[in-house]
Image: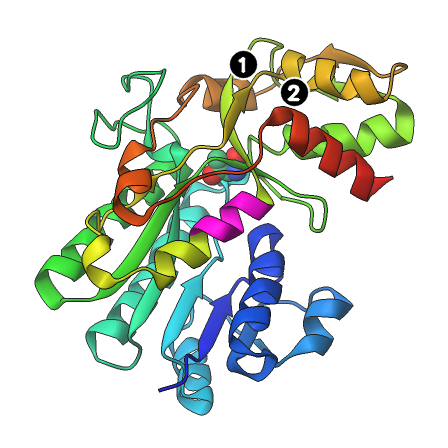
Amino acid sequence: MATKILIIGACGQIGTELTMRLREIYGNDNVVAGDIREGSTELMESGPFEIVDAMNRTSIEDICLHYEINEVYLMAAMLSATAEKYPKKAWNLNMDSLFHVLNLAKEGKIDKIFWPSSIAVFGPTTPKENTPQQTIMEPSTVYGISKQTGERWCEYYFNKYGVDVRSIRYPGLISWKTLPGGGTTDYAVEIFHEALKNNHYDCFLKEDTSLPMMFMEDAIKATVSIMQTKTENVKQRSSYNLAGMSFTPEEIAIEIKKHLPEFTITYKPDFRQAIADSWPGSIDDSVAREDWSWSHDYDLEKMVEEMLDNLK
Ligand code: AKB
């Protein structure tokens, strides 16, 4: 049977690049981009697009039936910084959408789900460096609470109903094609745009705040890989730790300065500092490496080069 995919949240930061990659692999007509609003011309013109409301089960189910979808990638979510401002809205979006796709799979209407978790599932009591796969998880943010709860439900639906749901705890994602929105790690993308435009960036985090990050290319590779691996290789049905690189605002600024010597940075921490302080500084992803042969390609140096080359 042909793989027929629906991506919910296809016009977002991850969705845009994921849609294009899945279309390359499975064929344009077999990958339906779904979002509440229209996206880039490339995405809209390269294959089917449907308006889909992630909070409305009928809206998702109708598209799944119409296109005979068997795999759903649920990429729609409210991220950490915005979720602190709209807790109830964030909870509703992040949880309702997940239940809709989990239940469609439970009822046999789709076969496989990808659902993104985040390093936000960890909290202030989690070991900060080389955070292990299994550890203390007491998230202190609205977003983190929703992601940790989501992980519990994914595992429950797998154990109880045999739902084939697969998940990754994404670190902060850095890309040049589509801007992120409403996250705490967004500074690591903004910094490039400001560096090229104004030679200066006013950072909302302190200079020594280390966070786990990943170049989008690696994140897409991981997502495709976990979805393509044999069922028996997916041993964690909550979500997998995933790591690429870790750096502080000061370290990324130094790297950018190597290419743009005039670049300067200042620090004006806001409410997002507390969110960042509650997250790990680095992640141990040895379990993903072992179970489905994950490996990353981009370090800080290579990522900065790639970002500047493409944004110039
Ligand atoms: C955010 O900053 O909220 C996200 C995340 C780490 O999940 N990028």
Residue at the image position 25 percent from the left and 28 percent from the top: 137
Q: Where is residue 236 in the image (x, y as percent from the top left)?
A: 21, 47
Residue 66, compared with residue 8, is above or below; it is: below
Which SS class for mark 2?
A: loop
Q: Nearer the viewer, residue 92 or 11?
A: 11
Q: Where are the magenta residues, as a range?
A: 217-222
Q: Is residue 93 visible?
A: no
Indicate yes or no whether the magenta region holds residue 207.
no
Which SS class for mark 1?
A: loop
- Alpha-carbon neighbours of circle 2 within 10 Å: few (<14), some, or many (≥20)? some
The reply to whether the C-beta atoms of the residues labelled 1 and 2 are less than 8 Å apart is no
The residue carrying mark 1 is: 209
Residue 38, compared with residue 213, is above or below; it is: below
Q: Position of residue 251 (x, y in %)?
A: 64, 14
Residue at the image position 76 percent from the left and 18 percent from the top: 202
The residue carrying mark 2 is: 204
Q: Considering the whole magenta stretch, tell me its main secondary structure.
A: helix
